[in-house]
Image (tube, helix red, strand yellow):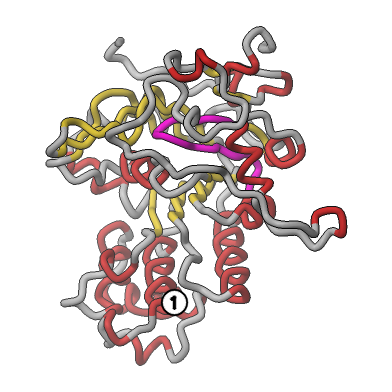
């Protein structure tokens, strides 16, 4: 592999959404993130490539264990080493390969240019420090402000994410907040410096439906304040994806199985796994008032993935070659990507 970073021009398979710049903000190329475990090496992310363009919201969906969160943690180089490590690939941010820079340089980017809302706020927040200290810390680290101004900005951020009596609660500790309130604090920390790219890993998991809508609206509102700001949204909620995203990545077994616009994925899904996910959604339509569809079987262990297609053990359209031959990515009409033997010869 060449040591020079690739250009950030979009590939044919991941063209930018309408209205956005043609130059990618983030380019991930052949990312491989592995974990050393007792039984060998677990390939949590194995050859993932995608791009995030300025101004877009990119959704990443898939069952637990598909590699979504590990992909996002890899972008920020937050994989615990040991046991994890980035085995290969490039993560190019504004023309700079993040896998090649020092940890000191990476800390300047985290929180300021790329921020992340973590899935588990109780483990992400430090129980020994007040909420106010943890919000102001990010502001003081990346913004040229004094402590009083950082404090006031932190109070405003807590108010914006819906923390009642925010000024008083700045002196409270994480254990004094409910799960939903801790999640709001995490969102406030991530948005405090108005980053160019927000990685949101299940940002509304612990919130009720009304609050979910408010938080998503806030994220989109803050993104709109910067012309090039983008969001990488990791979620299990396909309804949220349909409402907020322009493009969607479907992951399974540490690989991208399908990628396309929201319209392509929801109206014309190609991969059997994507079809199974969409068929499992409940509907009030009289035509679909029947038992919910379920994808048969379970997600295989990461240490025991099939040698061919990673979905072959659960696929209703499985063929003999699927068990032994890993299908390549096929680029179909409209730049829609699918990793499936059913589409051999159908690509452009």
Q: Nearer the viewer, residue 166 or 272?
A: 272
Q: Position of residue 243 (x, y in %)?
A: 69, 55
Point out the image quarter for the N terminus.
top left
Q: Residue at x 45, y 78 (%)?
A: 156
Q: Is residue 303 left or right of residue 17?
A: left
User: Magenta: predominant secondary structure element?
Assistant: strand
Q: Is residue 327 left or right of residue 124?
A: right
Q: Is residue 194 visible?
A: yes
Relative to 252, residue 80 above or below: below
Q: Nearer the viewer, residue 183 or 303?
A: 303
Q: Which residue is mark 1?
A: 180
Q: Secondary structure at mark 1?
A: helix
Q: Residue at x 76, y 57 (%)?
A: 290
Q: Nearer the viewer, residue 196 or 254?
A: 254
Q: How many numbered marks have been drawn onto this rendered protein structure?
A: 1
Q: Residue at x 71, y 42 (%)?
A: 266
Q: Nearer the viewer, residue 324 or 49?
A: 324
Query: Dividing the picture into quarters, in which one does residue 140 lie?
Result: bottom left
Q: Position of residue 143 (x, y in %)?
A: 33, 60
Q: Is residue 285 left or right of residue 44?
A: right
Mark 1 crowd level (few <14, some 14–19, many ≥20, 10 Å Cα): some
Q: Position of residue 271 (x, y in %)?
A: 62, 30
* 7 inside magenta stretch: no
* 254 inside magenta stretch: yes
Relative to 10, residue 213 above or below: below
Magenta extent: 244-259
Q: Position of residue 63 (x, y in %)?
A: 48, 47
């Amino acid at each position: 592999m060449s040591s020079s970073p690739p250009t950030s021009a979009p590939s044919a398979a991941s063209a930018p959404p309408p209205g956005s710049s043609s130059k990618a903000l983030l380019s991930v190329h052949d990312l491989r993130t592995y974990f050393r475990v007792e039984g060998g090496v677990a390939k949590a992310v194995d050859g993932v490539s995608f791009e995030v363009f300025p101004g877009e919201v990119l959704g990443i969906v898939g069952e637990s264990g598909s590699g979504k969160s590990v992909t996002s943690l890899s972008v920020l180089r937050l994989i615990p080493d040991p046991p994890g490590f980035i085995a290969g690939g490039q993560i190019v941010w504004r023309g700079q390969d993040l896998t090649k820079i020092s940890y000191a340089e990476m800390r300047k980017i985290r929180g300021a240019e790329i921020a992340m809302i973590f899935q588990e706020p109780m483990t992400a927040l430090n129980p020994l420090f007040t909420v106010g200290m943890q919000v102001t810390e990010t502001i003081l680290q990346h913004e040229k402000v004094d402590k009083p101004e950082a404090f006031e900005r932190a109070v405003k951020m807590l108010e914006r994410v819906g923390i009642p009596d925010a000024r008083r609660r700045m002196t409270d500790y994480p254990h004094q907040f409910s799960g939903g309130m801790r999640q709001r604090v995490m969102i406030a920390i991530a948005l405090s410096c108005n980053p160019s790219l927000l990685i949101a890993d299940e940002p509304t998991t612990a919130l009720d439906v009304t609050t979910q809508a408010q938080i998503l609206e806030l994220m989109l509102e803050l993104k709109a304040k910067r012309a090039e700001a983008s969001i990488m949204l990791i979620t299990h909620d396909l309804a949220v994806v349909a409402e907020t995203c322009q493009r969607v990545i479907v992951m399974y077994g540490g690989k991208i199985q399908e990628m396309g616009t929201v319209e392509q994925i929801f109206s014309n899904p190609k991969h059997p796994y994507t079809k199974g996910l969409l068929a499992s959604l409940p509907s009030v339509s009289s035509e679909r008032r029947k038992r919910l569809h379920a994808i048969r079987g379970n997600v295989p262990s990461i240490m025991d993935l099939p040698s061919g297609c990673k979905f072959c053990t659960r696929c209703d359209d499985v063929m003999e070659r699927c068990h032994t031959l890993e299908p390549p990515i096929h680029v179909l009409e409209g730049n829609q990507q699918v990793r499936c033997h059913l589409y051999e010869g159908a690509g452009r």
